[in-house]
Amino acid sequence: MIVPIHLENTTTVKYDVVIDALPKLTFNRKVAIITNTTVAPLHLETLKSKIDADELFVVTIEDGESFKNLATIEQILNELFEHKLDRKSLLIALGGGVIGDMTGFTASLYQRGIGFVQVPTTLLAQVDASVGGKTGVNNPYGKNLIGAFYQPEAVYIDTEFLKTLPSREFAAGIAEIVKMAVMFDKAYFDFLMEADFSQKEVLEKAIERSVELKAEVVNLDEKESGIRAVLNYGHTFGHVIENETKYTQYVHGEAVAIGIMMANALAVELGMMHQEEMDLVEQFLIKHNLPTTYEIKDVDAFYDKFFLDKKAANNKLKFILPQNIGGHEMRDDISESTLKKVLKAF
């Protein structure tokens, strides 16, 4: 299966998302694989066996969201300089969303920009993070506040990599899958409600549909000036949760799952979603072992952190909310009192 990415606002950016067994990859240039200490023992040799390159190097960093920062980017850059990569060289991201984000960001910086390829090994990265060219790192002020839009040359999605994925990480990817369905496709949501993801063909179909939906959005709006912001459904709340818990209590998809429930509660409060629909989404998340509740200790502090979100502009907060299941709306007119009323319920 191939899902093409063709950005409408540029005549130069075209690449494919390939959903299949990892093919043989030939590169007439220097290549550096960027991976981490968890993924390398599991999948590095498999990837290396598929690559034919002029020279092949490996940069291995520590695993975890807590290492997604500028210090790690500098570590990667230094190793690339040590290996004397040039402007024609290529980086390959082997890992989940953190590795993909940091590899893409490094590629955008190294000698003002070199090519990179995504080989995602987590479900979350396969259905979302590896597609669309969002790259970046975290800092004390929030998540992904430093970064760039920088598109890969290709994305290779092989579900065989998921066989070693811990169940918690697999569930995290499910949160990103249901996000796409609730925002854009009621029929897809109905499919997901009955889906058995242990079946390879069902899983590949879910990945394909998620990537198709994301590709449609990215093709229209690469730089998130409009509809692409809809992909942040659940994330505005989820990023605050991650920040409050210092990126240690939840993996990203778990925080997004809770954020989805908070967004849905706000949508119900505003009459945009029926309670029964909110309950259906919650049932789906619980079925796949995702958290749906969070104890907000200080509503005022939680609210203030919204203003660090990248979608906040001119001191106005923007929220991505479901319009029933299968529709969406961006709202920047929600009062502080309404928001805090919903937050107090958590």
Image (cartoon, rainbow, N blue to C red):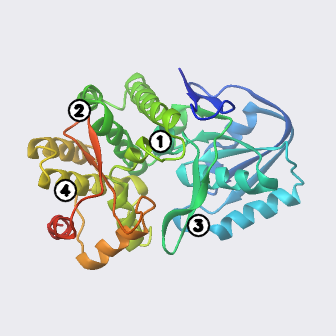
Q: Are marks 1 and 2 in contact (CB under 8 Å)?
A: no
Rendered position, 206 above or below 162: above
Q: Which residue is mark 2?
A: 193
Q: Is residue 238 above or below residue 93?
A: below
Q: Quadrant of residue 230?
A: top left
Inspect the image, locate mark 3, and give the three-letter code of the amino acid beneath it: Phe
Mark 2 closeness class: few <14, some 14–19, many ≥20 residues within 10 Å: some
Residue at figure coordinates x 54%, y 48% from the top left: 96
Q: Earlier in the sequence, mark 3 or mark 1?
A: 3
Residue 23: x and y in percent read: 67, 25
- The numbered mark, 3 or 4, whose residue comes first in the sequence reads 3
Nearer to us of marks 1 and 2 is 1
Question: Depth-wise, is mark 3 or mark 4 nearer the camera?
Answer: 4
Of 38 and 211, nearer the camera is: 211
Residue 316 vs residue 101: left or right? left
Label placed on residue 128: 1
Q: CA distance from mark 1 to mark 2?
A: 19 Å
Residue 26, quarter of picture: top right
The kind of secondary structure element at disc 1 is helix
The residue identified by callout 3 is 67
Instruction: State the residue position of label 4.
Output: 266
